[in-house]
Image: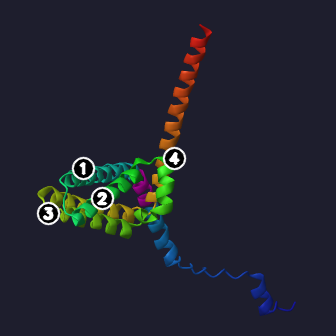
Amino acid sequence: MSETPSWLQAGNEAPAPAPAASAPAPVGSINLEPSTGAAAATTEVDDKDLPSIILMMRLLNMGVAGAVIAISIVLLIGIPAISTFVLGIYAICGGLLICCLETQLKFLRVMIAVNFGFLFSSFWRFLFYLILASVCWSYNNLMGKILAACLAGVAVFNTYVLCRYPSYRKIRERIAEEEDKRIEARISKEVKKQAIKNMTGSGK
């Protein structure tokens, strides 16, 4: 009997598979997944904190705006020079604009968004607050200088919030819509009560 050829013997014995070289995991995917998760977690935490920060920001803005209006009216009552009078009128208008922005009334909110959209920009809002601060500083009295310093501080805080929280405007609009719904529900409830009273009174 002839010997089995060597190539046939080699074919019968299945060669042991070579150990597959473990493909190196993409460095980018390893680094990106944790960072993406961390970024998502940070964003979620930021969004949870943002409503309270927006409330604080609104109170500060309305506080300094009310102070600007009050001190400007007191200044105008004293009948100052014409230049100071014009600056006082400007400061009152600026304070009223800030108050209207922070009251979150629906019709005012839409009008301000259309005509005074610069208040939603971090740079332009900062510049607007500094202009109001310079007007208060020009009053040349102690209250004016204190209020100018307060306006500068609030301007820095506003700029920080607008830059730190990119979703500020979206969450602010959501809060405003929730407030609108609560106001509408309260008005509807009062209207229903009044209607029931009127029907009960007419029935008697």
Residue at the spot x=46%, y=64% of the render?
117
Q: Tell me which numbered mark, 3 or 4, is placed earlier along the sequence.
A: 3
Q: The C terminus is located in which quarter?
A: top right
Q: Disc 3 on helix, strand or loop?
A: loop
Q: Which mark is residue 70?
A: 1
Q: Which residue is at the front of the view, 65 or 1?
A: 65
Which residue has dot 3 on it?
A: 140
Q: Which residue is at the front of the view, 52 or 191?
A: 191
Q: Position of residue 193 (x, y in %)?
A: 54, 22
Q: Dot 2: few (<14), some (14–19), or many (≥20) neighbours within 10 Å?
A: some
Judge from the rendering whether residue 167 lies leftward or rightward of residue 54; answer left or right: right
Q: Is residue 105 above or below residue 13?
A: above
The range drawn in magenta is 41-48
Q: Which mark is residue 89?
A: 2
Closer to the eye: label 3 or 2: 2
Q: Position of residue 115 (x, y in %)?
A: 48, 62
Q: Tell me which numbered mark, 4 or 1, is placed earlier along the sequence.
A: 1
Amino acid on which the number 1 mark rests in the picture = Ala
